[in-house]
Amino acid sequence: MIDRYSRPEMASLFSLESKFAMWREIEVLACEAQAGLPDTDITPAEAAEIRARADFSLERIAELESTLHHDVIAFLTDMAEHIGPASKWVHYGMTSSDLGDTALSWQLTQATDVLIADVARLGEICKRRAFETRDMLCVGRTHGIHAEPMTLGMKFGRWTHSLHRAFKRLHGVRRQIAVGAISGAVGSYSNIDPAVEAYVCKKLGLEPDPLSTQIVARDRHAFFLSVLAGVAAVAEEIATEVRALQKTDTLEVEEPFLPGQKGSSAMPHKRNPIVSERICGLARVVKANAQVGLNDVALWHERDISHSSAERVALADSSIALDYLLDRLAWVLDGLVLYPDNMRANLDKTRGLIYSSRVLLALVDTGMSREDAYEVVQGNAMAVWDDLQHARAGASFRQRLEADPNGALGAEQLEDIFDPHSFLTRIGVLFDRLKRVEFS
Protein backbone atom coordinates (compact mmCIF):
# COMPACT_ATOMS: atom_id res chain seq x y z
CA MET A 1 0.00 0.00 0.00
CA ILE A 2 1.47 3.34 -1.01
CA ASP A 3 2.32 5.69 1.83
CA ARG A 4 -0.26 8.29 0.86
CA TYR A 5 -3.05 5.88 1.72
CA SER A 6 -1.78 4.64 5.07
CA ARG A 7 -1.63 5.81 8.66
CA PRO A 8 1.48 5.34 10.79
CA GLU A 9 0.10 3.04 13.50
CA MET A 10 -1.38 0.49 11.11
CA ALA A 11 1.42 0.73 8.55
CA SER A 12 4.03 0.09 11.24
CA LEU A 13 2.28 -3.13 12.27
CA PHE A 14 2.98 -4.55 8.82
CA SER A 15 6.53 -3.30 8.48
CA LEU A 16 9.42 -5.76 8.27
CA GLU A 17 10.86 -4.40 11.48
CA SER A 18 7.58 -5.08 13.30
CA LYS A 19 7.32 -8.59 11.88
CA PHE A 20 10.84 -9.53 12.87
CA ALA A 21 10.35 -8.01 16.34
CA MET A 22 7.34 -10.32 16.76
CA TRP A 23 9.35 -13.28 15.51
CA ARG A 24 12.11 -12.45 18.00
CA GLU A 25 9.66 -12.30 20.90
CA ILE A 26 8.04 -15.61 19.97
CA GLU A 27 11.39 -17.38 19.70
CA VAL A 28 12.50 -15.96 23.05
CA LEU A 29 9.23 -16.92 24.72
CA ALA A 30 9.55 -20.46 23.35
CA CYS A 31 13.04 -20.73 24.87
CA GLU A 32 11.78 -19.45 28.21
CA ALA A 33 8.92 -21.94 28.11
CA GLN A 34 11.28 -24.83 27.38
CA ALA A 35 13.62 -23.77 30.18
CA GLY A 36 10.68 -23.97 32.58
CA LEU A 37 9.85 -27.58 31.75
CA PRO A 38 10.97 -30.33 34.16
CA ASP A 39 12.63 -32.51 31.54
CA THR A 40 14.68 -30.16 29.37
CA ASP A 41 18.29 -29.43 28.49
CA ILE A 42 18.03 -25.66 28.14
CA THR A 43 18.78 -23.91 31.41
CA PRO A 44 17.09 -20.81 32.81
CA ALA A 45 20.45 -19.05 32.52
CA GLU A 46 20.63 -19.80 28.82
CA ALA A 47 17.05 -18.61 28.34
CA ALA A 48 17.94 -15.38 30.16
CA GLU A 49 20.98 -14.95 27.94
CA ILE A 50 18.82 -15.45 24.83
CA ARG A 51 16.39 -12.84 26.15
CA ALA A 52 19.20 -10.36 26.79
CA ARG A 53 21.06 -10.83 23.51
CA ALA A 54 18.31 -11.60 20.99
CA ASP A 55 18.29 -9.03 18.20
CA PHE A 56 18.17 -8.75 14.42
CA SER A 57 19.40 -6.59 11.58
CA LEU A 58 17.16 -5.88 8.61
CA GLU A 59 20.18 -5.44 6.39
CA ARG A 60 21.80 -8.69 7.48
CA ILE A 61 18.55 -10.65 7.05
CA ALA A 62 18.16 -9.29 3.52
CA GLU A 63 21.77 -10.21 2.74
CA LEU A 64 21.32 -13.76 4.04
CA GLU A 65 17.98 -14.25 2.31
CA SER A 66 19.49 -13.33 -1.04
CA THR A 67 21.53 -16.52 -0.76
CA LEU A 68 19.33 -18.75 1.41
CA HIS A 69 16.01 -17.89 -0.25
CA HIS A 70 14.27 -18.64 3.05
CA ASP A 71 13.21 -15.74 5.23
CA VAL A 72 12.86 -17.68 8.49
CA ILE A 73 16.29 -19.29 8.19
CA ALA A 74 17.81 -15.93 7.30
CA PHE A 75 16.20 -14.43 10.40
CA LEU A 76 17.34 -17.29 12.66
CA THR A 77 20.88 -17.15 11.28
CA ASP A 78 21.07 -13.43 11.92
CA MET A 79 19.65 -13.79 15.43
CA ALA A 80 22.15 -16.56 16.20
CA GLU A 81 24.96 -14.18 15.31
CA HIS A 82 23.69 -11.80 17.97
CA ILE A 83 23.09 -14.44 20.64
CA GLY A 84 26.11 -16.70 20.38
CA PRO A 85 26.35 -20.34 21.60
CA ALA A 86 22.99 -20.31 23.43
CA SER A 87 21.28 -19.78 20.07
CA LYS A 88 21.30 -23.56 19.57
CA TRP A 89 18.08 -23.62 21.60
CA VAL A 90 16.33 -21.05 19.45
CA HIS A 91 13.60 -22.58 17.25
CA TYR A 92 14.18 -25.92 19.00
CA GLY A 93 11.49 -28.40 17.86
CA MET A 94 9.71 -25.70 15.86
CA THR A 95 9.00 -25.25 12.17
CA SER A 96 8.75 -22.08 10.12
CA SER A 97 4.97 -21.84 10.24
CA ASP A 98 5.00 -22.15 14.02
CA LEU A 99 6.82 -18.86 14.02
CA GLY A 100 5.16 -17.20 11.04
CA ASP A 101 1.55 -18.14 11.75
CA THR A 102 1.69 -17.32 15.44
CA ALA A 103 3.25 -13.95 14.67
CA LEU A 104 0.67 -13.33 11.94
CA SER A 105 -2.19 -13.98 14.36
CA TRP A 106 -0.61 -11.64 16.90
CA GLN A 107 -0.21 -9.05 14.17
CA LEU A 108 -3.81 -9.38 12.97
CA THR A 109 -5.28 -9.11 16.46
CA GLN A 110 -3.45 -5.81 16.90
CA ALA A 111 -4.64 -4.66 13.47
CA THR A 112 -8.20 -5.60 14.39
CA ASP A 113 -7.96 -3.57 17.59
CA VAL A 114 -7.09 -0.52 15.49
CA LEU A 115 -10.00 -1.16 13.14
CA ILE A 116 -12.42 -1.66 16.04
CA ALA A 117 -11.39 1.75 17.38
CA ASP A 118 -11.82 3.26 13.88
CA VAL A 119 -15.34 1.92 13.52
CA ALA A 120 -16.29 3.02 17.04
CA ARG A 121 -15.11 6.55 16.32
CA LEU A 122 -16.99 6.67 13.02
CA GLY A 123 -20.11 5.19 14.58
CA GLU A 124 -20.14 7.79 17.36
CA ILE A 125 -19.84 10.56 14.77
CA CYS A 126 -22.81 9.15 12.84
CA LYS A 127 -24.87 8.79 16.01
CA ARG A 128 -24.16 12.37 17.07
CA ARG A 129 -24.99 13.76 13.66
CA ALA A 130 -28.17 11.66 13.52
CA PHE A 131 -29.53 13.43 16.57
CA GLU A 132 -28.31 16.79 15.30
CA THR A 133 -30.31 16.29 12.09
CA ARG A 134 -33.19 14.30 13.58
CA ASP A 135 -35.82 16.72 12.24
CA MET A 136 -34.00 18.08 9.16
CA LEU A 137 -36.47 17.44 6.36
CA CYS A 138 -35.28 15.90 3.10
CA VAL A 139 -36.79 13.76 0.40
CA GLY A 140 -36.35 10.02 0.43
CA ARG A 141 -35.42 8.42 -2.86
CA THR A 142 -36.09 4.90 -4.11
CA HIS A 143 -34.64 3.82 -7.46
CA GLY A 144 -33.13 7.33 -7.49
CA ILE A 145 -36.66 8.81 -7.78
CA HIS A 146 -38.30 11.02 -5.17
CA ALA A 147 -40.44 8.85 -2.87
CA GLU A 148 -41.66 10.33 0.47
CA PRO A 149 -40.42 12.90 2.99
CA MET A 150 -37.93 11.72 5.59
CA THR A 151 -35.16 13.37 7.61
CA LEU A 152 -31.42 13.48 7.17
CA GLY A 153 -31.08 12.12 10.69
CA MET A 154 -32.59 8.85 9.50
CA LYS A 155 -29.72 8.43 7.04
CA PHE A 156 -27.12 9.02 9.75
CA GLY A 157 -29.06 6.67 12.04
CA ARG A 158 -29.07 3.86 9.50
CA TRP A 159 -25.34 4.27 9.01
CA THR A 160 -24.87 4.11 12.78
CA HIS A 161 -26.63 0.75 12.95
CA SER A 162 -24.61 -0.59 10.00
CA LEU A 163 -21.39 0.46 11.69
CA HIS A 164 -22.51 -1.10 14.96
CA ARG A 165 -22.98 -4.43 13.18
CA ALA A 166 -19.51 -3.99 11.66
CA PHE A 167 -18.18 -3.25 15.15
CA LYS A 168 -19.59 -6.51 16.48
CA ARG A 169 -18.32 -8.50 13.51
CA LEU A 170 -14.80 -7.18 14.06
CA HIS A 171 -14.96 -8.29 17.68
CA GLY A 172 -16.09 -11.71 16.48
CA VAL A 173 -13.36 -12.10 13.89
CA ARG A 174 -10.77 -11.00 16.43
CA ARG A 175 -11.65 -14.06 18.50
CA GLN A 176 -11.42 -16.27 15.40
CA ILE A 177 -8.00 -15.00 14.38
CA ALA A 178 -6.44 -14.89 17.87
CA VAL A 179 -4.86 -18.37 17.75
CA GLY A 180 -1.27 -19.54 17.73
CA ALA A 181 0.35 -22.82 16.74
CA ILE A 182 3.70 -24.17 17.93
CA SER A 183 3.20 -27.83 17.18
CA GLY A 184 5.97 -28.92 14.82
CA ALA A 185 6.29 -30.13 11.26
CA VAL A 186 2.79 -31.63 10.83
CA GLY A 187 1.17 -30.44 14.04
CA SER A 188 1.79 -33.57 16.14
CA TYR A 189 4.10 -31.95 18.76
CA SER A 190 6.68 -34.56 17.72
CA ASN A 191 9.65 -32.55 18.99
CA ILE A 192 8.07 -29.93 21.23
CA ASP A 193 5.92 -30.04 24.34
CA PRO A 194 2.39 -28.58 23.97
CA ALA A 195 3.16 -26.63 27.13
CA VAL A 196 5.48 -24.42 25.05
CA GLU A 197 2.62 -23.51 22.72
CA ALA A 198 0.33 -22.80 25.67
CA TYR A 199 2.93 -20.56 27.35
CA VAL A 200 3.73 -18.55 24.22
CA CYS A 201 0.09 -18.09 23.29
CA LYS A 202 -0.86 -16.94 26.76
CA LYS A 203 1.89 -14.33 26.73
CA LEU A 204 0.67 -13.02 23.37
CA GLY A 205 -3.02 -13.01 24.27
CA LEU A 206 -3.77 -15.90 21.90
CA GLU A 207 -5.38 -19.32 22.24
CA PRO A 208 -3.63 -22.47 21.00
CA ASP A 209 -5.11 -23.72 17.75
CA PRO A 210 -6.92 -26.94 18.73
CA LEU A 211 -5.37 -28.87 15.83
CA SER A 212 -2.95 -27.30 13.41
CA THR A 213 -1.25 -29.34 10.73
CA GLN A 214 1.85 -27.16 10.88
CA ILE A 215 -0.24 -24.16 9.84
CA VAL A 216 -3.28 -22.40 11.22
CA ALA A 217 -6.14 -23.27 8.85
CA ARG A 218 -6.77 -20.46 6.38
CA ASP A 219 -10.54 -20.35 6.80
CA ARG A 220 -9.76 -18.07 9.73
CA HIS A 221 -7.88 -15.64 7.53
CA ALA A 222 -10.56 -15.84 4.84
CA PHE A 223 -13.13 -14.89 7.47
CA PHE A 224 -10.91 -12.01 8.58
CA LEU A 225 -10.66 -10.64 5.04
CA SER A 226 -14.39 -11.18 4.48
CA VAL A 227 -15.26 -9.19 7.59
CA LEU A 228 -12.93 -6.39 6.51
CA ALA A 229 -14.61 -6.46 3.09
CA GLY A 230 -17.99 -6.11 4.78
CA VAL A 231 -16.82 -3.11 6.79
CA ALA A 232 -15.41 -1.55 3.62
CA ALA A 233 -18.73 -2.12 1.87
CA VAL A 234 -20.54 -0.20 4.61
CA ALA A 235 -18.06 2.66 4.29
CA GLU A 236 -18.50 2.60 0.53
CA GLU A 237 -22.27 2.80 0.88
CA ILE A 238 -21.98 5.88 3.09
CA ALA A 239 -19.44 7.57 0.82
CA THR A 240 -21.56 6.80 -2.23
CA GLU A 241 -24.54 8.54 -0.63
CA VAL A 242 -22.41 11.58 0.17
CA ARG A 243 -21.30 11.71 -3.46
CA ALA A 244 -24.88 11.38 -4.70
CA LEU A 245 -26.15 14.11 -2.40
CA GLN A 246 -23.29 16.43 -3.42
CA LYS A 247 -24.17 16.35 -7.13
CA THR A 248 -24.79 19.85 -8.49
CA ASP A 249 -28.37 18.87 -9.34
CA THR A 250 -28.98 17.83 -5.72
CA LEU A 251 -26.46 19.67 -3.48
CA GLU A 252 -27.94 18.75 -0.13
CA VAL A 253 -24.59 17.98 1.51
CA GLU A 254 -20.95 18.62 0.67
CA GLU A 255 -17.75 17.14 1.99
CA PRO A 256 -15.36 19.69 3.50
CA PHE A 257 -13.48 21.85 1.01
CA LEU A 258 -10.36 23.21 2.66
CA PRO A 259 -8.87 26.71 2.29
CA GLY A 260 -6.47 26.72 -0.64
CA GLN A 261 -7.88 23.49 -2.06
CA LYS A 262 -8.37 23.27 -5.82
CA GLY A 263 -10.93 21.02 -7.48
CA SER A 264 -9.90 20.84 -11.13
CA SER A 265 -6.88 21.72 -13.24
CA ALA A 266 -9.17 22.95 -16.02
CA MET A 267 -12.32 24.19 -14.26
CA PRO A 268 -11.63 26.46 -11.28
CA HIS A 269 -15.25 26.36 -10.11
CA LYS A 270 -15.18 22.64 -9.24
CA ARG A 271 -15.64 21.35 -5.68
CA ASN A 272 -15.43 17.60 -6.19
CA PRO A 273 -16.14 14.89 -3.56
CA ILE A 274 -12.63 13.52 -3.99
CA VAL A 275 -12.26 11.99 -0.52
CA SER A 276 -15.57 10.14 -0.79
CA GLU A 277 -14.53 8.90 -4.23
CA ARG A 278 -11.19 7.75 -2.81
CA ILE A 279 -13.02 5.85 -0.08
CA CYS A 280 -15.13 4.06 -2.69
CA GLY A 281 -12.04 3.19 -4.72
CA LEU A 282 -10.11 1.75 -1.79
CA ALA A 283 -13.18 -0.18 -0.65
CA ARG A 284 -12.99 -2.06 -3.96
CA VAL A 285 -9.46 -3.20 -3.08
CA VAL A 286 -10.56 -4.48 0.34
CA LYS A 287 -13.59 -6.27 -1.11
CA ALA A 288 -11.51 -7.89 -3.86
CA ASN A 289 -9.02 -9.20 -1.30
CA ALA A 290 -11.75 -11.24 0.36
CA GLN A 291 -11.64 -13.49 -2.70
CA VAL A 292 -7.89 -13.91 -2.22
CA GLY A 293 -8.55 -15.13 1.32
CA LEU A 294 -11.16 -17.62 0.13
CA ASN A 295 -8.79 -18.94 -2.52
CA ASP A 296 -6.10 -19.44 0.14
CA VAL A 297 -8.19 -21.91 2.18
CA ALA A 298 -7.59 -24.96 -0.04
CA LEU A 299 -3.98 -26.14 0.33
CA TRP A 300 -2.28 -29.43 -0.49
CA HIS A 301 -2.44 -32.01 2.30
CA GLU A 302 -1.12 -30.63 5.60
CA ARG A 303 0.19 -27.46 3.98
CA ASP A 304 1.84 -25.78 1.06
CA ILE A 305 2.86 -22.15 0.67
CA SER A 306 0.62 -21.06 -2.19
CA HIS A 307 -1.28 -18.95 0.35
CA SER A 308 1.78 -17.20 1.74
CA SER A 309 2.71 -14.83 -1.06
CA ALA A 310 -0.90 -13.78 -1.68
CA GLU A 311 -1.77 -13.13 1.95
CA ARG A 312 1.38 -11.11 2.57
CA VAL A 313 -0.14 -8.59 0.17
CA ALA A 314 -3.86 -9.04 0.89
CA LEU A 315 -3.80 -9.04 4.69
CA ALA A 316 -1.56 -6.00 4.93
CA ASP A 317 -3.24 -4.05 2.14
CA SER A 318 -6.76 -4.69 3.42
CA SER A 319 -5.89 -3.72 6.98
CA ILE A 320 -3.98 -0.60 5.94
CA ALA A 321 -6.55 0.50 3.35
CA LEU A 322 -9.52 -0.05 5.66
CA ASP A 323 -7.87 1.85 8.50
CA TYR A 324 -7.17 4.74 6.15
CA LEU A 325 -10.59 4.90 4.51
CA LEU A 326 -12.40 4.71 7.87
CA ASP A 327 -10.33 7.61 9.12
CA ARG A 328 -11.07 9.63 5.99
CA LEU A 329 -14.79 8.84 6.22
CA ALA A 330 -14.82 10.04 9.82
CA TRP A 331 -13.27 13.29 8.59
CA VAL A 332 -15.91 13.64 5.86
CA LEU A 333 -18.90 12.98 8.11
CA ASP A 334 -17.65 14.99 11.07
CA GLY A 335 -17.23 18.05 8.87
CA LEU A 336 -20.02 17.34 6.38
CA VAL A 337 -21.58 20.61 5.23
CA LEU A 338 -25.39 20.54 5.18
CA TYR A 339 -27.74 22.61 3.01
CA PRO A 340 -31.24 22.33 4.55
CA ASP A 341 -32.68 25.00 2.24
CA ASN A 342 -31.68 22.90 -0.76
CA MET A 343 -33.17 19.85 0.93
CA ARG A 344 -36.47 21.67 1.26
CA ALA A 345 -36.32 22.92 -2.33
CA ASN A 346 -35.73 19.37 -3.53
CA LEU A 347 -38.59 18.18 -1.34
CA ASP A 348 -40.91 20.54 -3.22
CA LYS A 349 -39.35 19.94 -6.63
CA THR A 350 -42.03 17.54 -7.90
CA ARG A 351 -44.91 19.93 -7.09
CA GLY A 352 -46.34 17.71 -4.39
CA LEU A 353 -46.08 14.29 -6.04
CA ILE A 354 -44.29 12.88 -2.99
CA TYR A 355 -47.57 13.06 -1.05
CA SER A 356 -49.34 10.60 -3.37
CA SER A 357 -49.28 7.69 -0.89
CA ARG A 358 -51.13 9.75 1.73
CA VAL A 359 -53.67 10.87 -0.85
CA LEU A 360 -54.25 7.25 -1.89
CA LEU A 361 -54.92 6.14 1.68
CA ALA A 362 -57.15 9.13 2.40
CA LEU A 363 -59.33 8.29 -0.59
CA VAL A 364 -59.55 4.66 0.52
CA ASP A 365 -60.63 5.91 3.95
CA THR A 366 -63.59 7.69 2.29
CA GLY A 367 -64.89 4.30 1.15
CA MET A 368 -63.45 4.36 -2.37
CA SER A 369 -61.96 1.09 -3.63
CA ARG A 370 -58.18 0.97 -3.77
CA GLU A 371 -58.28 0.46 -7.54
CA ASP A 372 -60.48 3.53 -8.11
CA ALA A 373 -58.43 5.60 -5.65
CA TYR A 374 -55.21 4.58 -7.39
CA GLU A 375 -56.64 5.65 -10.74
CA VAL A 376 -57.58 9.10 -9.41
CA VAL A 377 -54.20 9.64 -7.79
CA GLN A 378 -52.11 8.32 -10.66
CA GLY A 379 -54.07 10.24 -13.27
CA ASN A 380 -53.45 13.56 -11.57
CA ALA A 381 -49.88 12.63 -10.72
CA MET A 382 -49.00 11.74 -14.30
CA ALA A 383 -50.36 15.06 -15.54
CA VAL A 384 -48.02 16.85 -13.15
CA TRP A 385 -45.19 14.51 -14.14
CA ASP A 386 -45.73 15.33 -17.80
CA ASP A 387 -45.44 19.05 -17.04
CA LEU A 388 -42.22 18.42 -15.10
CA GLN A 389 -40.74 16.34 -17.91
CA HIS A 390 -41.26 19.14 -20.40
CA ALA A 391 -40.36 21.98 -17.99
CA ARG A 392 -43.84 23.46 -18.37
CA ALA A 393 -45.59 25.65 -15.85
CA GLY A 394 -48.67 23.94 -14.59
CA ALA A 395 -50.88 23.14 -11.65
CA SER A 396 -49.40 21.40 -8.65
CA PHE A 397 -50.53 17.95 -7.59
CA ARG A 398 -52.63 19.42 -4.80
CA GLN A 399 -54.26 21.96 -7.14
CA ARG A 400 -55.20 19.22 -9.58
CA LEU A 401 -56.73 17.14 -6.80
CA GLU A 402 -58.71 20.12 -5.57
CA ALA A 403 -60.10 20.58 -9.08
CA ASP A 404 -60.83 16.88 -9.65
CA PRO A 405 -64.52 16.08 -9.01
CA ASN A 406 -63.52 12.50 -8.20
CA GLY A 407 -61.07 13.61 -5.52
CA ALA A 408 -63.58 13.71 -2.65
CA LEU A 409 -61.07 15.39 -0.31
CA GLY A 410 -61.66 18.74 1.36
CA ALA A 411 -59.22 21.63 1.69
CA GLU A 412 -58.58 20.97 5.39
CA GLN A 413 -57.86 17.30 4.75
CA LEU A 414 -55.51 18.16 1.87
CA GLU A 415 -53.70 20.65 4.10
CA ASP A 416 -52.90 17.85 6.53
CA ILE A 417 -51.94 15.41 3.76
CA PHE A 418 -49.54 17.87 2.12
CA ASP A 419 -47.65 18.55 5.36
CA PRO A 420 -44.30 16.69 5.17
CA HIS A 421 -44.26 16.30 8.95
CA SER A 422 -47.38 14.14 8.73
CA PHE A 423 -45.14 11.34 7.41
CA LEU A 424 -42.84 11.55 10.41
CA THR A 425 -45.07 11.29 13.46
CA ARG A 426 -43.62 7.88 14.38
CA ILE A 427 -39.91 8.38 13.78
CA GLY A 428 -39.38 8.85 17.50
CA VAL A 429 -39.23 5.08 17.84
CA LEU A 430 -36.26 5.04 15.44
CA PHE A 431 -34.31 7.47 17.58
CA ASP A 432 -35.26 5.70 20.80
CA ARG A 433 -33.63 2.61 19.31
CA LEU A 434 -30.63 4.65 18.22
CA LYS A 435 -30.06 5.87 21.77
CA ARG A 436 -29.35 2.30 22.82
CA VAL A 437 -26.52 1.80 20.33
CA GLU A 438 -23.19 1.74 22.15
CA PHE A 439 -19.71 1.31 20.67
CA SER A 440 -18.11 -0.24 23.73
Image (cartoon, rainbow, N blue to C red):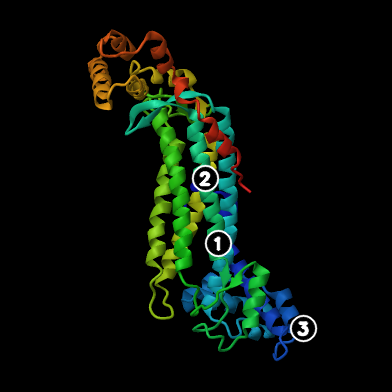
Q: Which residue is mark 1?
A: 108
Q: Which residue is mark 2?
A: 163
Task: Give the alpha-carbon distance from disc 1 to disc 3, as whole Å.
Answer: 33 Å
Q: Residue at x 46, y 76 (%)?
A: 69
Judge from the rendering whether residue 357 lies leftward or rightward of residue 183; answer left or right.
left
**Nearest to the observer: residue 265 or residue 356:** 356
Circle 3: residue type? Ala
Q: Residue at x 55, y 50 (%)?
A: 167
Q: Residue furthest front?
A: 367
Circle 1: residue type? Leu
Residue 159 sits above or below residue 407 on the image: below
Quadrant housing residue 238: top left
Residue 111 seen in render = yes
Residue 279 sits above or below residue 213 on the image: above
Q: Residue at x 65, y 81 (%)?
A: 195
Mark 3 or mark 2: name the one nearer the start of the chain: 3
Mark 1 or mark 3: name the one nearer the start of the chain: 3
Mark 1 or mark 2: name the one nearer the start of the chain: 1
